[in-house]
Amino acid sequence: MNLWAVLLTGLFAGGASCAAVQGGLLAGTITRRQPAPVPAGARPKGSRKSATPPPPTRTEDVAPVGAFLVGKLASHVLLGAALGLLGDAVQISPRVRAYTQMFAGIVMLLLALDLLGVRAVRGIVPAPPKAWSRLVRRSGRLGGSLGPAVLGVSTVLIPCGVTLSVMFLAVASGSVVSGALIMGTFVVGTMPLFAVIGYAARRSTVGLRGRLGMLAGVAVLVAGLVAINAGLVLNGSSVTLAGAVRGVTGGDTATPVAAPPVAADGVQRIAIEVYDTAYSPSLVTAKAGVPTELTLRTDGTQGCTRSIVMSSLNIEEVLPETGETAIDLGTLEPGTYRYTCGMGMYGGSIKVVA
């Protein structure tokens, strides 16, 4: 995945997912810095000052949000460099990646239930270190932008599902510089939405602020389900949340493509076109007991579809933007072999019949 694709991932997918997990924290820190209205009865006699504090200046609007974004960018660039260094020494298998994605989804579900007021999960919801939390609370009451900046740095401790996927790309880069660039570019892509959230928190009414926790809880719940589904897809599971929805709605209407003929050398060759957001055909038939070769064709392809994972066969390949990549699948037994992009968003199946 090139940096333009990483930027677009942050802009369209990462922004929404990360804002669901971290946006409420940003809004809470921003609003805690604002002076509360003074009740009319509490004002000194003869005071002509309004009970409502003056609206924040443009600098007061921009400074805390900017401090949060700078802190978030700095911490994730350092994280990316560390992950690239790790990837130079350790290779993470697709199955481990899938389990990590599902674990992240479960954590997000617990966080969502906590935000929605379910007391039963209060004791098991993971939280950043207490020292971190105390520092954020104390700095949030200060006049400067230290609180938002510290919160921005601390978001590295509470990654969202899409961030985890990009973290694996940083590991796969196997380079300190590439890992830092990948994580930094991703965070830059998420910045516009966080800027809107921070500005809205500065200008919103008290009534709206009271609903931020509820709205964040619903958003985190959806993001958690998406992360779990992506993990199931990456793991090659036949049971996924998206599959269940398609089964109920009748949306799974893909027609399988007939098995390719066996060539003179005894090999059946399957060809699949790789697009930015899809594989075509998405369902292919093959014969069991015959050596099989899968050819993936790209033509200026961008995005996560260039990283293809077949967990059941322990195969993971990163495709060129343009070209053909042949993968030896060996002699397959009857069954359905699923493949997916490196983020568990797009995929297809090879149905092997006797």
Image: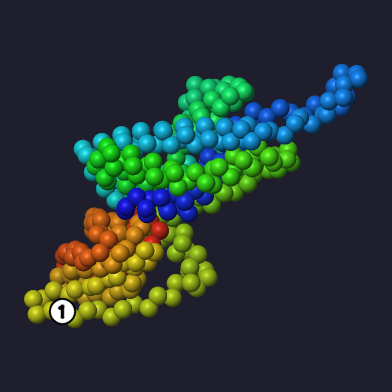
Q: Quadrant of the C terminus?
A: bottom left
Tell me if residue 188 comes above or below residue 292 in the rendering.
Answer: above
Residue 312 seen in this snapshot: no
Give the x, y percent position of residue 266: 10, 76
Q: Which residue does the image show at 49% across and 37% down from the upper left?
A: 69
- Toward the front, the furthest residue is 58
Is 264 rendered above or below residue 158? below
* Residue for badge 1: 262
Disc tally is 1
Counting from the top left corner in percent of width and height, residue 213 is at: 63, 41
Which residue corresponds to the image point at 48% horizontal and 54% vertical from the top-left?
12
- Compared across the picture, whether 238 is left or right of 106 comes to left
Of 145 and 117, the residue lying toward us: 145
- Counting other residues with Cα less than 10 Å from the Cα at mark 1, is it few (<14), some (14-19), or many (20 or more)? some
Q: Position of residue 350 (x, y in %)?
A: 29, 69
Q: Mark 1: which amino acid?
A: Val
Display coloring: rainbow
The answer to which quarter of the image holds residue 284 is bottom left
Is the residue 308 above or below the residue 86 in the image?
below
Q: Quadrant of residue 315?
A: bottom left
Quick check: 34 left or right of 248? right
Asked whether 186 or 330 is in front, the reply is 186
Residue at x-position 83% and y-position 25%:
49
Residue at the image point whose x is 37% and y is 36% from the top: 77
Q: Quadrant of residue 353?
A: bottom left
The image shows residue 62 at horizontal and vertical percentages of 58, 36
| Residue 257 visible somewhere in the drawing | yes
Q: Secondary structure at mark 1?
A: loop
